[in-house]
Image: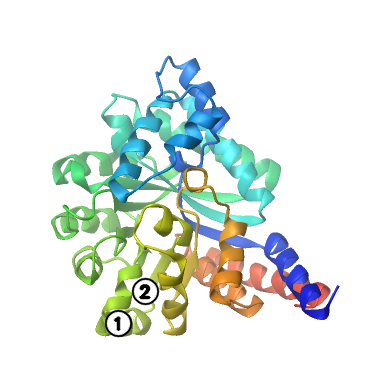
Amino acid sequence: MSTQQQLISALDEFIVRMPKVELHLHLEGAIQPATLLALAERNGVDLPARDEAGVAQLFRYHNFHEFLTVFMVLTRSLATGRDFEQVAYELGAHLAEQHVRYAEVMISPVQYHRRALDLDEVVQGTAAGFARAAREYNVRVGLVFDYGRQFGVDLAWRLLESAVRNMKYGVVGWSIGGDEINHPPEPFAGVFAAARRAGLQVMAHAGEVVGPASIWGAIEALGVRRLGHGIRSIDDPALLAYLRTHAIVLDVCPTSNIRTGAVPALDAHPLRRLFDAGIPLTINTDDPVFFGTTLCDEYRLAVRQFGFTADDLVQLTLTGARAAFLPEADRLALARELEEESAGLRAALGV
């Protein structure tokens, strides 16, 4: 094996073993196909798939709206607190396998409210699953309500009450996602202000399939300091300067952006340009099962496609620790733990 091949092999091992943070991850998009089918059968839900190959076929999207449609269909399989506990535990175990020490996992409350599920049961079941994973695997998870903006402001107020009520069960954040094209962020300004007053941290999906105006709106109207995706900021030099100066973090999901058509091809993805512009970034999977990826795969992509180094990967991870929806002392402790462990691992591997 050549020296170059040895370095590549060592870097790949570093990617696998390095302690990580993931901040943009949807619970519903992380359910394994076999579990999805079992839950559908248990709950009498008729899915447009009969086996794992059929589920995989559903994951072949042509655009973002097609993805949203499949997403909403598959969430029908989840019906009880027991279901949510199971999928949360399985996700927690999967995160631990990738050496993720802290993650923030979004749930889509509208999907369950519209089916008259008890949101308290949804949250508390999810929290129980992650608590079990924390005990067994030492992975910490915070929950974020990700509201589908296409369902309007009035319902958002009602679901915010549920998020606040369940803060004691690990809900740490409030977000908007969903149809960015037809529903700008500005109408949700009051909801976000109320969320902040209640003690929730806030973020927003913005700049995924809509240009810089969506990002400016999320920053100025909603008061967010973290953005889901945010990749369209590359089109506005003034916005890039603002993000850099104000340390506003972009949670970037490269494979997701390709699979939903938000970016036409990997060589067109602005990840490297955003990083080189000094924008604080994290790398995430978004919906790992739906998009056929893992966090380790996303890190490998950053190295192989975009030329990221071990230094760069550690920087991304530390950005995640410092941007997490945790108390300040916990953020600093997490960053210190990740930095020290990564340094020891790099020394051992020679990367």
Res. 248 mark: 2
For the residue pair 330 and 71, the one nearer the viewer reads as: 71
Query: Earlier along the polypeptide chain: callout 2 or callout 1?
Result: 1
**Quarter that holds the N terminus:** bottom right
Task: Tally the marks.
Answer: 2
Where is the C terminus found, in terms of image quarters? bottom right
**Which residue is outermost to the right?**
1
Relative side of 306 to 264, left or right = right
Amino acid marked by disc 2: Ile
Is residue 328 shown to the viewer in this render? no
Density class for disc 1 (Cα within 10 Å; few <14, some 14-19, many ≥20) is some
Q: Residue at x 51, y 42 (%)?
A: 30
**Disc 2 vs disc 1: Cβ atoms closer than 8 Å?**
yes
Q: Is any part of residue 115 visible from this angle?
A: yes
- Horizontal and vertical percent for residue 261? 35, 56
Left or right, 55 with reference to 313: left
Coordinates of residue 57 in the picture (x, y in percent): 46, 35
- Residue 224, by quadrant, is bottom left
Residue drawn 81% across the image and 73% down it:
6
Residue 255 on image: x %, y %: 47, 58
Instruction: Kindly identify which numbered label has been placed on residue 261.
Output: none
Q: Residue under circle 1?
A: 242
- Indicate left or right for 299 with 210 as reference: right
- Look at label 1 and name its amino acid: Tyr
Q: Nearer the viewer, residue 2 or 325?
A: 2
**Which structural element holds mark 2?**
loop
Residue at position x 41%, y 78% in the image: 274
